[in-house]
Amino acid sequence: MSEMQNIQWFPGHMTKTKRQIQASLKLVDAVAEIIDARIPVSSRNPDLSKLIQNKPRVILMNKCDMANKTATKMWIDYFDKQGITAIAVDCKSGRGLNKFTPAVTKVMSKRIEQLKSKGMVNPTIRIMIVGIPNVGKSSFINKVAKHNRAKVEDRPGVTRGNQWYTIAKNLEMLDTPGVLWPKFDDRLVGERLAITGAVKDQILDIELLAVRLLDFLKKLKPEDFIARFKLEDIDIDNYDSFDLLYLVGKKRGMLVSGGEVNTERAAIMLLDEFRAAKLGRITMEMPYGG
């Protein structure tokens, strides 16, 4: 755990955030949770389900353009079996966001019918957006809300200061008043968040991070990675991951005096290319531990 000691989880901050989310939950009918499609486990907070409890939920698998298509479909099927509607989206480009309103309408269909039976014509549904830092919440809000921030002072019973947005006819969205980090009990959670760029590189040893990524790539052997670094004629299983980082740096000409490889530069380059999906569309976590 010492390698990850600089990633901290602050119980005090978490307690405050939990209180804020619990208070806001009373104002909404459903919850939309944004996760990273490349790391659907590590990019979720395990306490969130306890907080949400029985509220209807939609999961937005963001950055789907960087994740493996087959894996994303498997995750959507997995969530469906848990009774949760999930959709693949890319919040920066807007891809898949047209499915958001229909997904909310689907999960809220019973509630909408109940309200209509009570004489409410076209009832308004309110949904809260949650997600850990750097998972794409701001990009999502910018795309779907555009400039439609609601005037909270005009809404009776709605707490002043919350960020409300009108995102479709009869659909309003509340931005979470705080953020939740996962607990870093599992070293892999911290590492995968760092590899995907959710955690700042400065707080971790960049070469260690690249080696951890190569540990994974050696098992997966993505074609784009092999081709990009011309590793077709090499059995990468015979390489220690640090030696493989050295080789990758050498192939890119990242040499210093004496012909040695600048492994720090190689590590930065490798992580940058992974985060830009230049090594292929890669999902690091599979349902059922696959």
Image (cartoon, rainbow, N blue to C red):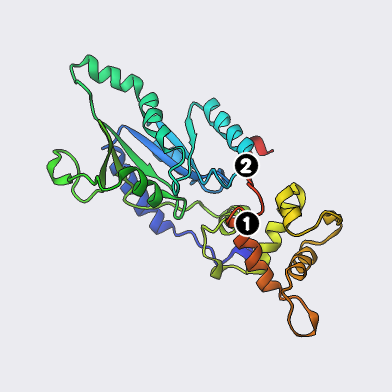
Specify the quadrant that holds the C terminus.
Answer: top right
Q: Position of residue 94 (x, y in %)?
A: 43, 43
Tell me which residue sits at (50%, 62%) in the image: 8
Give the secondary structure at mark 1: helix
Mark 1 residue type: Phe
Pointers 2 and 1 in contact (CB under 8 A)?
no
Q: Is residue 249 left or right of residue 10?
A: right
Q: Where is residue 190 in the image (x, y as percent from the top left)?
A: 57, 57
Q: Is residue 199 above or below residue 110?
A: below
Mark 2 residue type: Asn
Tell me which residue sits at (52%, 48%) in the image: 43
How packed mark 2 is, by other alpha carbons closer than 10 Å (few <14, some 14-19, many 20 or more), is some
Q: In which quarter of the image is residue 243?
A: bottom right
The answer to whether residue 54 is seen in the rendering is: no
**In the drawing, what numbered circle is on residue 274?**
1
Q: In this view, does 279 lie above or below 289?
A: below
Tell me which residue sits at (19%, 20%) in the image: 121
Q: Which of 30 and 227 is in front in this view?
A: 227
Could you give the CA–CA distance between mark 2 and mark 1, rounded to whole angstroms?
13 Å
Q: Mark 2 points at which residue?
A: 68
Q: In this view, does 98 lie to the left or right of 27?
A: right
Give the secondary structure at mark 2: loop
Q: In which quarter of the image is residue 5?
A: bottom right
How packed mark 1 is, by other alpha carbons closer than 10 Å (few <14, some 14-19, many 20 or more), is many
- Return the disc, 2 or 1, that comes first in the chain's sequence: 2
Q: Position of residue 178 (x, y in %)?
A: 35, 52
